[in-house]
């Protein structure tokens, strides 16, 4: 048999993506140095599909139809470079190599520039949706040269998640655009997770909700405008029991967040651009604060923050908190999408924002019904700098932002840390302020450093001998 597609690296993601391709009628071959992984690949294949596992790259490359199409799903960093070097002598001009891992976009750009003159197509592709998504329908964000994309488009569209019969994948732009879009996806993922955790804190410590009440609240939310993957899994988390103690599992999990770094990359790159994404920055910072558990325990003893019960009608407060979450989530997407808009121009990636949000509607971690609203906004104006400037979204925000304010006020009064919610609102308030107090900063800069300032009434830059 001549195979349609090859996968290098049969870890959880590689294996499941490959089996997904086979389920859609493609003949596939997988390589891994670990013979257990190649064996279990064949064993896990659906009956009647064509799946083969091999132990050397040579065997794989020899059996692929030309131009060869292959993907690597290996840990980001050096392993990707190592695979590329081993592949080089085996490939021919025109072959397409996709990196489907969470590589940093600057690495992808370097690899594109390294391989392009050699005649190979290299594509960076973000894949979202975890193990289950990979097997049954992920969201995929491929970028690179368009010619290479056309070779793999039918396959990617076949295996992607579908929303309204449309695949959750599309060409994301030039060079490293695929990995750039995935990086920002993860930044938004961090921010929404932070917001949900703060809302959980308000409901649990402030209002005294039990886990089963929390389950009910998130269940209800997931049936309305907040419907999204992250709200849905949060709903289910509150029902999970711990096998060991029989307690609710969420209560025995240590409050220290891990991270693989993609959220941090988003913040770092936003600073470089520059573009403001304060809620993503806050989400990264709060994971860091969560890490200094011992210090927090000590500080809690010194300051004994008194989380006093939030009083009032539980039902009304829950509704208000839900609206607050909804508004803040919109502000997170607005930040991430405006970052993509700016980065696309700055790095000449030509990222089609309407296709980005369309591909995010299903399969990925940040999928939500809101994406449909963003899709409408970008379809009407693909060059929209910020979704907050869209008329329909503005109407939604106007209706909900009051609840965000009230929720923050109450949280502050009750000593509940809500940095994500606060930064989301502060972003909105600053973005919608016609005249910011930044004139004063300019005056100070000119005062102490002769850095000059611009005026509101005439062109040019000016300096004043302050106090003279
Ligand atoms: C996805 C996820 C996935 C992974 C994150 C986890 O879209 O499927 O984003 O790629 O779960 O990288 O990131 P942290 O370990 O940094 O939280």
Image (spheres, grey):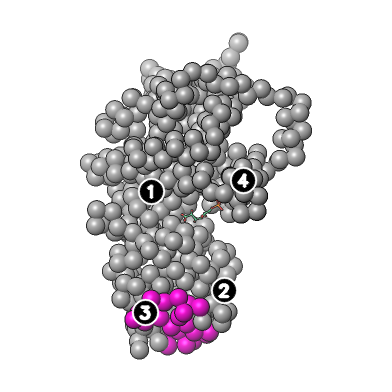
- Say whether residue 461 is visible: no
Q: Which of the 4 image quadrants contains residue 152?
A: bottom left
Residue that carries the numbered disc 1 in the rendered image: 367
- Label 3 sits on residue: 47
User: Mark 3 against mark 4, which lies toward the viewer?
Assistant: 4
Of pointers 3 and 4, the one earlier in the residue sequence: 3
Residue at 41 percent of width and 40 percent of height: 219
Question: Sequence order check: which comes first, mark 2 or mark 3?
Answer: 3
Q: In the drawing, what numbered circle is on residue 247?
A: 4
Q: Which residue is mark 2?
A: 82
Q: Is residue 142 above or below residue 248?
A: below
The kind of secondary structure element at disc 3 is loop
Q: Which residues are magenta?
A: 40-62
Give the Cα separation between the discs numbered 3 and 4: 40 Å
Query: Looking at the image, is mark 3 or mark 1 earlier in the sequence?
Result: 3
Comparing labels 1 and 4, the label whose residue is closer to the camera = 4
CB under 8 Å between discs 3 and 4: no
Question: Where residue 72 sits in the image (x, y, percent)?
Answer: 48, 71
Question: Does dot 2 land on a helix, a strand or a loop?
Answer: helix
Nearer to the camera, 250 or 324:
250
Q: Nearer the viewer, mark 4 or mark 2?
A: 4
The CA span between labels 2 and 3 is 34 Å
């Amino acid at each position: 048999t001549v195979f349609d597609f090859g996968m290098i690296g049969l870890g959880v993601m590689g294996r499941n993506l490959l089996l997904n391709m086979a389920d859609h009628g493609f003949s596939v071959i997988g390589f891994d140095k670990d013979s257990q992984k190649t064996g279990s690949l064949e064993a896990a294949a659906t009956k009647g599909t064509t799946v083969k596992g091999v132990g050397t790259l040579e065997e794989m490359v020899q059996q692929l139809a030309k131009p060869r199409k292959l993907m690597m799903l290996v840990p980001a960093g050096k392993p990707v470079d190592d695979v590329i070097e081993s592949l080089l002598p085996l490939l021919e001009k025109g072959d397409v190599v996709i990196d489907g891992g969470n590589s940093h976009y600057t690495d992808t750009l370097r690899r594109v520039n390294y391989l392009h003159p050699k005649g190979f197509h290299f594509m960076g592709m973000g894949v979202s949706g975890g193990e289950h998504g990979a097997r049954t329908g992920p969201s995929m964000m491929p970028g690179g040269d368009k010619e290479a994309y056309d070779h793999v488009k039918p396959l990617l569209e076949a295996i992607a998640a579908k929303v309204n019969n449309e695949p959750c994948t599309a060409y994301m732009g030039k060079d490293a655009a695929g990995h750039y879009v995935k990086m920002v996806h993860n930044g938004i993922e961090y921010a929404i997770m932070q917001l949900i955790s703060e809302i959980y804190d308000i409901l649990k410590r402030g209002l005294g909700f039990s886990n089963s009440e929390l389950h009910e609240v998130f269940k209800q939310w997931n049936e309305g405008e907040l419907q999204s993957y992250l709200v849905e899994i949060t709903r289910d988390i509150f029902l999970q029991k711990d096998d060991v103690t029989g307690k609710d599992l969420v209560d025995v999990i240590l409050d220290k967040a891990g991270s693989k770094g993609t959220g941090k990359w988003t913040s770092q790159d936003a600073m470089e651009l520059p573009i403001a994404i304060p809620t993503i920055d806050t989400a990264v910072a709060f994971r860091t604060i969560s890490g200094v558990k011992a210090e927090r325990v000590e500080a809690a003893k010194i300051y004994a923050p008194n989380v006093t019960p939030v009083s009032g009608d539980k039902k009304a407060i829950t509704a208000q908190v839900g609206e607050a979450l909804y508004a803040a989530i919109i502000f997170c997407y607005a930040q991430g999408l405006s970052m993509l808009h700016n980065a696309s121009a700055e790095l000449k990636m030509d990222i089609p924002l309407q296709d980005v949000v369309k591909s995010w509607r299903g399969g990925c971690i940040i999928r939500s019904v809101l994406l449909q609203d963003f899709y409408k906004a970008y379809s009407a104006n693909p060059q929209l700098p910020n979704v907050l400037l869209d008329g329909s979204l503005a109407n939604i925000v106007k209706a909900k932002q009051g609840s965000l304010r009230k929720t923050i006020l109450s949280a502050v009064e009750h000593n509940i840390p809500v940095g994500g919610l606060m930064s989301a609102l502060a972003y909105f308030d600053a973005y919608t302020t016609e005249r910011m107090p930044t004139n004063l900063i300019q005056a100070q800069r000119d005062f102490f450093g002769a850095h000059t300032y611009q005026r509101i009434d005439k062109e040019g830059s000016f300096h004043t001998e302050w106090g003279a």
